[in-house]
Amino acid sequence: MSRHSRLQSSCEKSFQFTVDCLPPSLQSALIMNTQTHDALPSVLPAAKKLRQEDPQRIETGSGASDALDTRSEDSVHDIKIMNNKQNHLARIPLELFAEILSFVPSPRDVLSVARCDKHLCATLVRRSSDFIWRQARRNCRAGAIPDPTPNWTEAAYAAWLFDAGPCEMCWKTSKPVHVSYALRVRLCGDSACHLKYGRLLITAPPTVAGDAVTGWLVSVESGRFLNAVKPELELPTTVEYPKMDKYYRRKDLIGAMDAFSQASSGDQSALTEFLVAQEDKARRMPIIMKNAVALQRWRLDYIAKTKEIRKSNDLLGRCFAGNGGWDWAIMNATQTFSVFLRAHNNSLQRITNGDFEIIRDQVDLEITNLTRRRRRKQEEKSYAQNRARVALHYQRMKSAGVQQPMPSLLEFHRLPVIKALESSAPQEPTVDEQLKDEAFLKDTLEKDLQKWRERARARLAAVLGFPDWNTTSNIKLHPVDRLTARFVCKLCRKVAKKYEELGNLDFAGACAHMCPHLDKRQRAKYVWKPEQFAPDEKAIRAIKQLLQQQHLDSEDPDSALMIRGIEPKILCLSCDAAIVMDFDRLCMHSKRHEDMQLKVLRPSDVATVLKLPVEKGLHAQVTGQSYQTKRLRALKEYGCRHCLQKSKTPPEGKEGSSDVPSPSDPAPNPESPPESMPVRPHGKLWDFNGLQSHAKEKHGIEMLGDEDFYRYTLPTT
Ligand SMILES: [Zn+2]
Ligand SMILES: [Zn+2]
Ligand SMILES: [Zn+2]
Ligand SMILES: [Zn+2]
């Protein structure tokens, strides 16, 4: 909720609160006026603003009143004109307005009305409106509030008595737990603040200066306050000024004593002058103390009355809830009833059956709505919990690895059995435990998954060009299980981390694929479709060539096993250099050439071509995100195979050229190194970033692979 709307709602509550305190005949008049308040001003009233600007002024009373008055008198006319257009309350003559407010049971209510609007504030803080506040003070149900000392304005006095304010020690704003009216101190509920403040209070020493300053310096007025801050004194709580030891603020006392000592150290006339100057303070001191004592007594009654009223209203409220068949906590949380109860509590008024009858229907409606809203929230929460538990189970299934291929988590959530489980109420055992332990659920989930897989199989086979594949023969592989089943996503062209070195997806990868570029909202709408994939033609052509050379058929169930068994010995004939790779890198490498030509080397030839063996997984190892991989990348140990394994005779026709090394005539013959071959056996070495720049610039390779480079650690000398 924004500050403006918070303030607006607090203003509305203030009005409601005021209205509740009024006799029914006047309530309707006030309600009519507030309802036409189309926009309650977002400004705080002048009094509050002024207090923020200069807390001292309002604290010291008269200064604030003057400032407020001057400001009000000057601007009241303009404000009236400005507000009259929308504020009907401003049109009420002051006499009638005062009559309405004469029924409020506390100056706190007048304060609330004053804070509703600039005009009301300007009207109520004027000296001429003091009688309204006085009447409100008299009306207080916990006993009349003592008259303020002359240095207070009525508005500032009411604010001081009823507003929350900062704790003198920790400066946290809270309703004061302990107050000394004479010292004008508020303390919060924290006992540490009390004890800390207690250490600041001392008695006057039995010296001439000490005796003298007690004549005009204000001290703590009640034993109750002193007990809270100096528990070691163990004073009876009823003791009060003047029948108690006088405790002063250390700072005030020492300042006053120093001033006295300074004056008395000079001649007699200086001392006399000083004492005359303190006379005014000395005259005011007993008045302030008397008022503070009276306020402390009133405050005790007020707290007691508040407790009593709250208890009785609470009991009656529970009765109403019981009679209406409502839950007390929910009833108490409704807007109408909570305002009703708070307004009565604040104005120390008991709620009655008659009062409640007026709002009963509205409360009933709000309880129904609130119950519905809470139930919906609960359902949403349990749905989210169930979903999280399903995700946990999904991860467990995936890491177990037996259920391959698995759909993506998003698709998994959409399986019928999972959907039904997620929307069920939360219970023991939890959804993931049920899925793990209950045989029926496990079976149903397996059936759902099987159905999903079959659909995915048939449709992905269609993508590969086998729309009506249907065979039960077990000597023929399903198109999606063959080596030639390689897919790319047409929507994102991206692959999961696991497939990064391969550059395309197999059947399981396509099933689990979820486009990574989607935001939360798009992901909720995203539906996995086999038709979003396309066959990776270049890779498939290269694989077919490989199978052909190995005299294997992609339909053969053993083909995958046999191909994967071959060590890195696929030689690219389309590269300038003799680049050798294994099957996994073939897919990614094939993307570099329009029509990649390859040859499978004999094991003996591999050793001749490769001076340094291909390290599987080296690229993935150096491109990780960890701190270690960053350090690895910085090592100057990486060499370029495109330079090191350069063909002896540069190929003329690149693609499928016959000049490429053949097993019988391997290109980089170690005995007769090619011209560009460096003198050193390991070739030139770079750090990994340097190598990348070199490969891009020299060989036009954007993304290196295991087959493109080697790591060579120089022997330490
Ligand atoms: Zn505090
Ligand atoms: Zn995608
Ligand atoms: Zn190549
Ligand atoms: Zn190179």
Image (cartoon, rainbow, N blue to C red):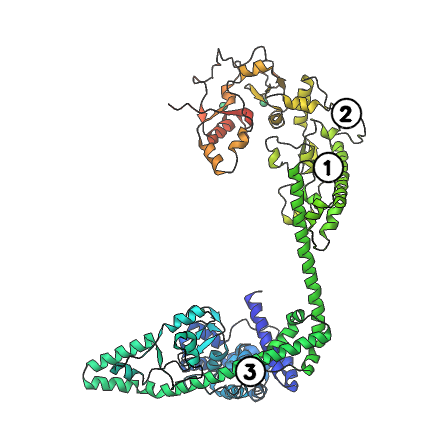
Q: Label 3 crowding class (10 Å Cα cut-off): few <14, some 14-19, many 20+?
A: some
Q: Is disc 1 placed on a helix, strand or loop? A: helix
Tell me: residue 73, above or below residue 670.
Answer: below
Q: Is residue 194 left or right of residue 663?
A: left
Give the quarter of the figure containing the C terminus. Answer: top left
| Front residue of this view, candidates 399 and 519 | 399
Name the residue beneath numbered marker 1: 531
Indicate which label's residue lies in the foreground, 3 or 2. Answer: 3
Quote the CA–CA distance across marks 1 and 3: 76 Å
Residue 305, disc: 3
Which amino acid, by three-letter code, is at mark 2? Lys
Indicate which label's residue lies in the foreground, 1 or 3. Answer: 3
Q: Can residue 58 be seen in this view?
A: no
Give the quarter of the figure containing the N terminus. Answer: bottom right
Which amino acid, by three-letter code, is at mark 1? Glu
Residue 646 in the image: state x and y as whole percent: 52, 18
Which amino acid, by three-letter code, is at mark 3? Lys
